[in-house]
Amino acid sequence: MQQIENKIQQGGRISKDDALQLFSMPLSQLAVLAWERKQHHSGNHVFYNRNVHIEPTNVCVNHCLFCAYRAPRGEFHAWEYSHDEIENLAKNALKKNITEIHIVGGVHPEWKIDYYLEILKRIRKLSKRVHIKAFTAEELSQMCKNANIPLHEGIELLQEAGLNSVPGGGAEIFDKSIRQKICPDKIDADTWLEVHKTLHKSGIPSNATMLYGHIETLQHRIDHLDRLRNLQDETGGFNAFIPLKYKSGNNQLSYVGESHVTDDMKTFALSRIFLDNIPHIKAYWPMIGKDNASISLAFGVDDLDGTIDDSTKIYSLAGSVEKHPAMSVEAIKTMARVAGLKAVERNSVYDIID
């Protein structure tokens, strides 16, 4: 263990076996190592932005066991926004001096790429400056499939219409056996990675995620991190990694319960240490709650996402404590200050604004 600690403190890369051993380290000791690695990447800064989410639909072709968001078409709680409705949402959001519009929704069975291109064009017509971060690898794959065009061609069309970057959703856990159990309809791990590789080669940066705390093992988590690190070595296109805690409300995996906060913090810390080539680790506070997001700042996290302004339902439907997720800039600054850090406003690719 001392050899592993020395390797980390000297800025070296740890192996998968090292990572497995690290997880058994006392929480306080792991926090120190993650803090040192965080300081190397971003010093005393904690990043945030001013953003809103637009979720075009919760109608989805997939049947993921962990999902409380999906609704069959025609059910009372299903929605399918028209282009006019999305344009109005964007117009109202832009009045709030935001810098990013984040667009993710269900994987609609019928919508082709033209539907999504129109979304981008309308938002871009409203604002030349706002950053549009949109569509998971799952959505990108499906919309191109529905349109019967190659992925790289679809990405090029989306980029021309105004797409700036892509979020990291849909990664879940890469292990094939776990994936077949919890999200059997989704694209496989190789396809997810290939979509992001294609994005990066097209000059479009993205984020990466991992859904943890359900039926996966620690070895599955480390394998997931290793595949992301390998792709980042190749492309350098990931801006941030976001560990996403499984929430057990209103879904078919509820029987497994949820991970303890100690497991959450170890996962953040291990992610920061293992992913030496991904610059930022994000705590998505609508998922873990503001209190735990604050704690995560001691475990290698250097990004708190954004203000969000009660514009997402994905985690609130699954039982998150943040039923109406919104956080002021002052609240973010206070959270960072209490942790002994400085909150810094960024744009979506981590250029400092404030």
Image (cartoon, rainbow, N blue to C red):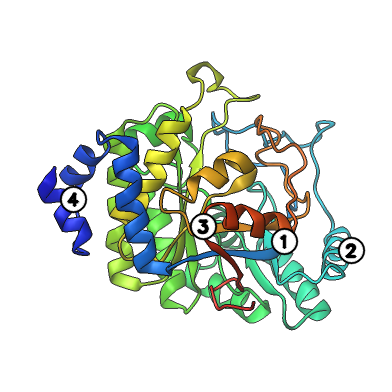
Q: Earlier in the sequence, mark 3 or mark 2?
A: 2
* Residue at figure coordinates x 29%, y 42% from the top left: 29
The residue to which callout 1 is attached is 329
Q: Is residue 217 left or right of residue 75?
A: left
The residue to which callout 3 is attached is 340
Q: Is residue 288 left or right of residue 323?
A: left
- In space, the residues marked 4 and 2 are separated at their CA atoms by 52 Å
Q: Which of the pair 197/256 is nearer the observer?
A: 256
Query: What secondary structure is found at the residue carrying circle 2?
Result: helix
Q: Are marks 4 and 2 in contact (CB under 8 Å)?
A: no
Q: Earlier in the sequence, mark 3 or mark 1?
A: 1
Number of other residues with Cα within 10 Å of mark 2, as a class: few under 14, some 14 to 19, many 20 or more: some
Q: Can see residue 41?
A: yes
On residue 88, which mark appears? Answer: 2
Query: What secondary structure is found at the residue carrying circle 4?
Result: helix
- Name the residue at the top extreme: 255
Q: Earlier in the sequence, mark 1 or mark 4?
A: 4
On residue 5, which mark appears? Answer: 4
Number of other residues with Cα within 10 Å of mark 1, as a class: few under 14, some 14 to 19, many 20 or more: some
* Residue at figure coordinates x 29%, y 51% from the top left: 33
